[in-house]
Image: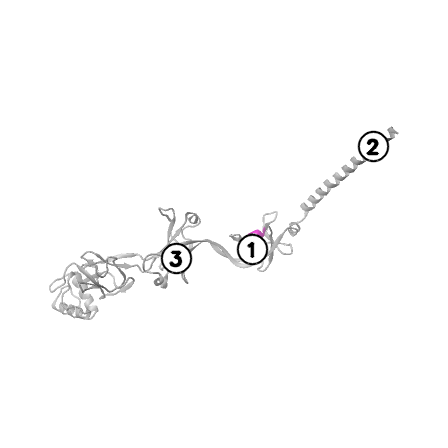
Amino acid sequence: MARQARELGRAVVRVRFALAWAVAVLLVGGVIGWAVAVATRPPQQVAAESTYVLVEAKEGAIGQSVAAVVTASWPLRQVAVNQASGTITRLLVSRGEDVEAGDVLYRVDERAVVALPGAVPAFRALTLGVSGADVTQLTRFLVAKKFLASTTSTFTASVQRAVRSWQKSLGVAGTGRLDRGDVLFVKTLPVRVALSSKFAVGGQVSAGDPAIEALASAPRFTVQYSDLQAKQVTEGMAITVDLGTQRWKGSVGPLTVTQDGSVKAPVRAAEGRTLCGEQCGKVPLQGTTQLKGTTEVQQSVAGVVVPLAALVSDANGSPGVIAADGQRVTVKVVARARGMAVVEGLAAGTAVRVPGQ
């Protein structure tokens, strides 16, 4: 009996070992079979079993831009120096106003100071008998205003009469002579002006004080970038400048680094034009105005747009997308920016699969 019991125990152990081995073989075989099946399935079938969302391909445009502040200011240049001495009793022109030949600019001790065209500044009194280029400038103006018949370089009696008549038309005493401080000869008239900041009613002026500064025909525009932004920007890139509803297009000029580490560049207009064109008058004349600037660091490209995440590559590296039905559509990538791509070979309105989270 004892021997039979021992033989039965050995048989049970052999049976249990055989069962365990059979189960192990089945498990390993199953895993290998699954791996082989997955490895031999086409990409469409694998994609079909992945988590995804459908996104519609749409007509659109992609690009990349940098937003930066653009400052606008009106450059000034000195065009005339005051020659009168005394107290300013009236200011008769405002900043940005166009001054023409014969306009009264201001009054000193109630004597009118008049703008006249001429390159030679007033340096003496113009009175009977004097001759020179300054007299020629004066008489040329008097002829243009119909006070004198012809231009001359000598202050004659006829010139004296013409000056007297002109003075009376201004509402000032008709003395027939011009003192040194009565006129400001300006090389080019008309001109948009800004009186010197020193000029204020009740203030004192003397000969030699700056009097008139001319405003440029257009404001100067400058864009400022941070150091990080500047790494994306190069000279010649397109930039738009917005002032309210106005939008002006230009290009980025040479970049220079400032002392504070920021980078500045002039905003250039097309050759022969001003950036703001006929709308320059909308830029405030006082101080500096901050405007919105947008620099196009990657040119905008239009076409059919899909998310970059929708793109898949085949074994040859060719890009494509997986349509809603699981079929692969080969595409050509035209441009990429900000997580999107413009592609060719795919119709707008096609739903494509984008892997889910």
Amino acid on which the number 2 mark rests in the picture: Gly
Amino acid on which the number 3 mark rests in the picture: Leu
Left or right: residue 223 versus residue 301 is left
Q: In the current view of this chain or complex, which residue is farthest to the top?
A: 3
Number of other residues with Cα within 10 Å of mark 2, as a class: few under 14, some 14 to 19, many 20 or more: few
> Residue 229, position in %: x, y?
43, 49
Amino acid on which the number 1 mark rests in the picture: Val
Which of the marked residues, 1 or 3, is nearer the chain's N terminus? Answer: 3
Which residue was labeled with disc 2?
A: 9
Q: Which mark is residue 306?
A: 1
At x 73% / y 41%, what residue is drawn? 27
**Marks 2/3: CA–CA distance:** 96 Å
What element does badge 2 sit on?
Answer: helix
Q: Quadrant of residue 346?
A: bottom right
Q: Is residue 148 visible?
A: no
- Counting every numbered tag in the picture gives 3
Left or right: residue 54 versus residue 77 is right
Task: Find the magenta span and give its range.
Answer: 305-311
* Tags 2 and 1 touching, CB below 8 Å: no
Which residue was labeled with disc 3?
A: 291
Question: Along the line of sight, which residue is nearer the eye, 24 or 213?
Answer: 24
